[in-house]
């Protein structure tokens, strides 16, 4: 049985105790942009915030791309969220290669170089990555000056968050 088959099966139990009032219009209070890494999946526990308050945008790193900016703007301007947290982490897989290395490796292992060069948004330093993201989000004219944009790094060894100033 594949993982997806298991998940589809397990969902039948989940739906039995599902609260239909959760199907109303979402009213997120904060946008969290974080990595796809599974260690960052339990954000309500990591941040001590209710699930319903969180709009979560996940990308590798994370990285703030044009798509991510669009999602942040929809969260703020359409759904009404009021703060933005850029949540990086230690031990990120995206620090373990460079875009050039991964392009070369995949071109060789698949025998097909036509997608290269793909942007994987690899990076080296989570602090610098966070500062770059804050700058990118803060400088967008459609993100209101009233909305705080802050960054933090989750330490996968301790579970602690450290704000990047
Ligand atoms: Zn990561």
Image (tube, rainbow, N blue to C red):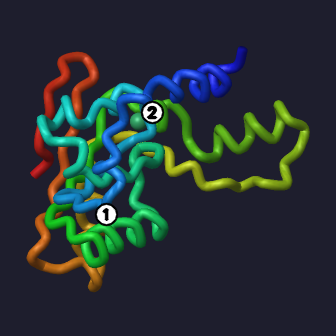
Residue sticking out furthest to the bottom: 141
Q: Is residue 37 left or right of residue 83?
A: right
Image position of 141 with respect to 28: above or below: below
What is the CA distance from the residue labelled 1 to the residue labelled 2? Answer: 19 Å
Residue wearing tag 1: 25
User: Which mark lies nearer to you, 1 or 2?
Assistant: 2
Residue wearing tag 2: 15
Q: Secondary structure at mark 1?
A: loop
Q: Quadrant of residue 152?
A: top left
Q: Is residue 89 left or right of residue 99?
A: left
Q: Is residue 40 left or right of residue 98?
A: left
- Residue 164, position as x, y percentages in the image: 14, 47
CA neighbours of label 2 inside 10 A, class few (<14), some (14 to 19), many (20+): few
Determine the quadrant in which ligand 1 lies.
top left
Give whichever of 106, 43 is nearer the camera.
Answer: 43
- Residue at image position (23%, 27%) is 155
Image position of 5 with respect to 128: above or below: above
- Residue 121, position as x, y percentages in the image: 51, 51
């Amino acid at each position: 049985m594949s993982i997806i088959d298991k998940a589809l099966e397990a969902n039948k139990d989940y739906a039995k105790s599902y609260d239909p009032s959760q199907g109303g219009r979402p009213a997120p209070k904060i946008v969290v942009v974080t990595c796809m890494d599974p260690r960052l999946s339990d954000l309500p526990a990591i941040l001590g915030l209710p699930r319903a308050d969180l709009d979560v945008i996940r990308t590798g790193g994370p990285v703030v791309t044009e798509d991510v900016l669009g999602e942040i703007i929809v969260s703020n301007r359409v759904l009404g969220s009021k703060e933005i947290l850029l949540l990086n982490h230690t031990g990120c897989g995206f620090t373990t290669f460079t875009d050039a290395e991964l392009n070369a490796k995949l071109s060789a292992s698949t025998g097909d170089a036509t997608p290269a060069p793909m942007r994987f948004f690899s990076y080296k330093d989570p602090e610098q990555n966070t500062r770059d993201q804050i700058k990118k989000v803060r400088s967008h004219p459609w993100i209101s000056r009233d909305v705080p944009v802050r960054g933090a790094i989750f330490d996968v060894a301790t579970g602690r968050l450290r704000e990047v100033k």
